[in-house]
């Protein structure tokens, strides 16, 4: 890759997260369109499912830069491992809660338009938090893990370049 076209790790990671979430949305949408019908009921329309899934993944698109910034700020290194564990445990729950609130908040205005009745947005938020907590927290930890992988890979590359430059100077 040319040096003038070396994108920042943050931009690469955000692009990967948005790309993966878009691919996942397309996969679920295709499975829904080609698969068996959903369970019967007023909220089981395909348009509602696609709208809900889009809201879920777009909320992650909004929250992924926050997760990446937290991963950059609280790295799992030998010196600050305890601090990073606490920060990601508490901060991850806040990110997950915010993502769920954004997703539910995006679903509520579109529900009447799609013919779905939402009795209580608060209840929808609590149900969403309880049902999706494990999945959302796993997504958060994957974003943090990818950020760390990019960081440590870049660090290893820089170390290799410095070693080769030192070798060239010594020879």
Image (cartoon, grey):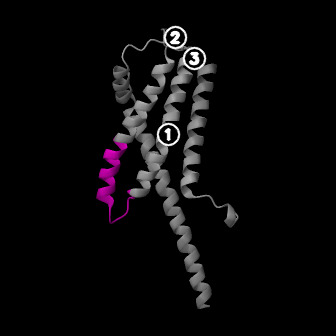
SS of the residue under disc 2: loop
Position in image of residue 84 (x %, y %): 34, 55
Mark 2, residue position: 115
Position in image of residue 91 (x %, y %): 34, 46
Determine the main secondary structure of the stretch shown in magenta.
Answer: helix
Q: In screen coordinates, is 82 left or right of 4?
A: left
Name the residue at 68% across, 61% down.
5
- Badge number at residue 106: none
The magenta-colored residue range is 74-93
Q: Are marks 2 and 3 in contact (CB under 8 Å)?
A: no
- Mark 1 and mark 2 lie on one chain; the one further toward the N terminus is 1
Name the residue at 57% across, 84% down.
166
Mark in front: 2 vs 3: 2
Name the residue at 68% across, 64% down.
4
Outermost residue, right side = 2
User: Is residue 87 on the magenta stretch?
Assistant: yes
Name the residue at 32% across, 59% down.
81
- Badge number at residue 46: 3
Outermost residue, front side = 109
Is 69 in front, or is 84? 69
Q: CA distance from mark 1 to mark 2?
A: 27 Å
């Amino acid at each position: 890759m040319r040096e003038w076209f070396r994108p920042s790790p943050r931009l690469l990671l955000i692009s990967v997260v948005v790309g993966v979430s878009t691919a996942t949305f397309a996969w679920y949408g295709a499975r829904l369109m080609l698969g068996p019908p959903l369970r019967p009921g007023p909220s089981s329309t395909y348009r509602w499912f696609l709208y809900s899934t889009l809201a879920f993944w777009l909320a992650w698109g909004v929250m992924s830069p926050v997760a990446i910034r937290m991963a950059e700020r609280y790295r799992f290194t030998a010196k600050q491992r305890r601090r990073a564990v606490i920060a990601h445990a508490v901060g991850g729950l806040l990110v997950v809660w915010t993502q769920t609130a954004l997703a539910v908040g995006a679903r509520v205005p579109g529900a009447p338009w799609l013919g779905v009745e939402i009795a209580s947005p608060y209840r929808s938020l609590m149900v969403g938090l309880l049902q999706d907590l494990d999945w959302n927290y796993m997504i958060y930890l994957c974003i943090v893990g990818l950020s760390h992988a990019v960081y440590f890979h870049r660090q290893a590359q820089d170390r290799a370049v410095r070693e080769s430059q030192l070798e060239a100077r010594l020879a």
